[in-house]
Amino acid sequence: MFSLFFGWQRKLRKLRKKWDRLREKTLKKEKPVRHILLEKLDRTEEKLRILEERTLTRWDRARLSKEIEIELEEIKAMLEAKPEEIVKEKSFIK
């Protein structure tokens, strides 16, 4: 019972759910912004899939889950930003 509330599987489900919701919101955006955000979401999903499918050490799980949380927060912030800012930021990266 205790593991249902504080277990690893619960944290994994919450990360996947957050990723799914951000993807749904991204699909509602216009073309250039949607493309940029979908690329970031795809890279994040690769890490999420590693967490779900592989057996990792506790330290590796914690590190990888923290990276995913940070990336999801960045994507959330990009969704709330103006489209011009996102496209402008992407052009500086290249």
Image: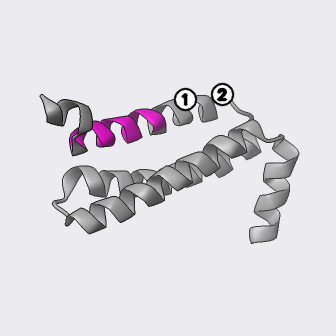
- The answer to whether 28 is drawn above or below residue 37 in the figure is above
The residue furthest bottom is 94
Asked if residue 93 lies in the magenta stretch, the reply is: no
Figure coloring: one colour
- Residue sitting at 24 percent across and 31 percent down? 5
Residue type for callout 2: Lys
- Residue 42 in the image: x percent, y percent? 48, 51
In the picture, the quarter occupied by the N terminus is: top left
Q: Which residue is mark 2?
A: 28
Residue type for callout 1: Glu
- Residue 32 in the image: x percent, y percent? 75, 46
Magenta extent: 9-18
The residue furthest front is 2
Asked if residue 15 lies in the magenta stretch, the reply is: yes
Q: Residues within 10 Å of mark 1 (few under 14, many from 20)?
A: few
- The answer to whether 74 is drawn above or below residue 2 in the figure is below
Q: Are marks 1 and 2 in contact (CB under 8 Å)?
A: yes
- Residue sitting at 82 percent across and 42 percent down? 83
Residue 24, disc: 1
Viewed as shown, does residue 27 lie left or right of 49?
right
For mark 2, give the secondary structure. loop
- Residue 88 in the image: x percent, y percent? 85, 57
For mark 1, give the secondary structure. helix
- Residue 94 in the image: x percent, y percent? 75, 72
- Residue sitting at 55 percent across and 35 percent down? 22
Whole-Å distance between the Cαs marked 1 and 2? Answer: 7 Å
Which secondary structure dominates the residues rendered in magenta? helix
Viewed as shown, does residue 6 lie left or right of 79?
left
20, 13: nearer the viewer: 13
